């Protein structure tokens, strides 16, 4: 069973959007998938720092 997803609205700087779109395309992912992936990685690293 896939995890439930929620739609959110955020405001990002134009230069960040362009960089993320380029990186997502290079990784063969959608913009949304790419943002989700990098946020998960960030949160995993943040949790590791808390445990240290």
Image (cartoon, grey):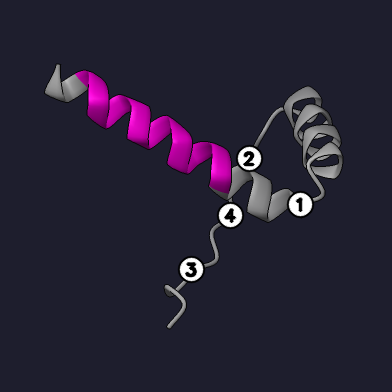
Task: Tell me the tag on residue 29.
Answer: 1
Q: Nearer the viewer, mark 3 or mark 4?
A: 3
Upstream in sequence: badge 3 or badge 2: 3
Residue range corresponding to the magenta coloring: 37-49
Q: Where is residue 16 in the image (x, y as percent from the top left)?
A: 73, 26
Mark nearest the camera among 2 and 1 is: 1
Mark in front: 1 vs 3: 1
* Closer to viewer: mark 3 or mark 2: 3
Residue ID for mark 4: 9
Looking at the rendered image, the quarter that the N terminus falls into is bottom left
The residue depicted at 66 percent of the width and 46 percent of the height is: 34
User: Which residue is disc 3 drawn over?
Assistant: 6
Of mark 1 and mark 4, the one earlier in the sequence is 4
Looking at the image, do the residues carrying marks 3 and 4 touch, with CB atoms under 8 Å apart? no
Residue 17 in the image: state x and y as whole percent: 77, 34
Q: How far apart are marks 1 and 4 (CA)?
A: 19 Å
**Label whose residue precedes the other's in the sequence (1 or 3):** 3
Categorize mark 2 by other alpha carbons within 10 Å: few (<14), some (14-19), many (20+): few
């Amino acid at each position: 069973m896939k995890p439930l997803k929620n739609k959110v609205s955020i405001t990002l700087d134009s230069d960040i959007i362009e960089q993320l779109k380029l990186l997502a395309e290079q990784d063969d992912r959608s913009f949304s998938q790419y943002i989700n992936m990098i946020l998960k990685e960030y949160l995993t690293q943040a949790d590791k720092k808390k445990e240290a």
